[in-house]
Image: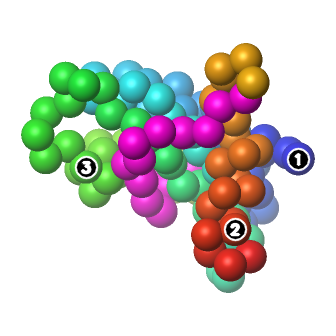
């Protein structure tokens, strides 16, 4: 399983987008995965959990509006999904692979 996302011929590394997400004070955890896109092949999508002190009303659209201007056009996410938790490995590290499996299963593919 590759960590790189191929967006219209460009290579996008999820860790670079995640590093920017972690600069936002409301974000506790972040994972970025590639989602299938009919036009560009794949498109990045961010999944985050919020810190307990996150401001009321901090949601996906607001985080996306904050994030995307800091990214190149090919790196921009199609959505920021706020979740209660993100999947972790046995040793407690965030698991991009498990998130990908979970999201694709929920989407029926």
Q: Is residue 18 above or below residue 83?
A: above
Residue 66 relative to residue 14: left or right: left
Q: Residues within 10 Å of mark 3 (few under 14, many from 20)?
A: some
Of 36 and 65, the residue lying toward us: 36
Q: Quadrant of residue 93?
A: top right
| Start-end of magenta stretch | 75-89
Q: Looking at the image, which residue is at 13% across and 33% down?
A: 55
Quadrant the C terminus occupies: bottom right
Identity of the residue furthest to the top in this view: 91
Q: Is residue 1 above or below residue 92?
A: below
Residue 20 relative to residue 3: left or right: left
Q: Residues within 10 Å of mark 2 (few under 14, many from 20)?
A: few
Nearer the viewer's eye, disc 2 or disc 3?
A: 2
| Image x and y of residue 5, in percent | 73, 52
On residue 59, the disc is 3
Q: Can see residue 105?
A: yes
On residue 105, the disc is 2
SS for callout 3: loop
Identity of the residue furthest to the front in this view: 90
Determine the CA span between mark 2 and mark 1: 16 Å
Colour convention = rainbow
Q: Main secondary structure of the magenta part?
A: loop
Q: Can see residue 68?
A: no
Q: State which tag comes first along the sequence, 2 or 1.
A: 1
SS for callout 1: loop
- The residue that mark 1 highlights is 1
């Amino acid at each position: 399983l590759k960590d790189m996302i191929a967006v219209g011929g460009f290579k996008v590394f999820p860790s670079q987008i995640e590093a920017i997400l972690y600069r936002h004070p409301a974000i506790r955890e972040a994972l970025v995965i590639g989602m299938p896109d009919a036009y560009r092949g794949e498109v990045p999508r961010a999944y985050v959990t919020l810190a307990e002190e996150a401001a009321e009303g901090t949601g996906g659209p607001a985080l996306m509006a904050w994030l995307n201007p800091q990214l190149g056009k090919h790196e921009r996410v199609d959505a920021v999904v706020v979740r209660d938790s993100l999947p972790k490995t046995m040793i407690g590290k965030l698991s991009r692979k498990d998130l990908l499996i979970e999201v694709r299963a929920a989407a029926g593919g």
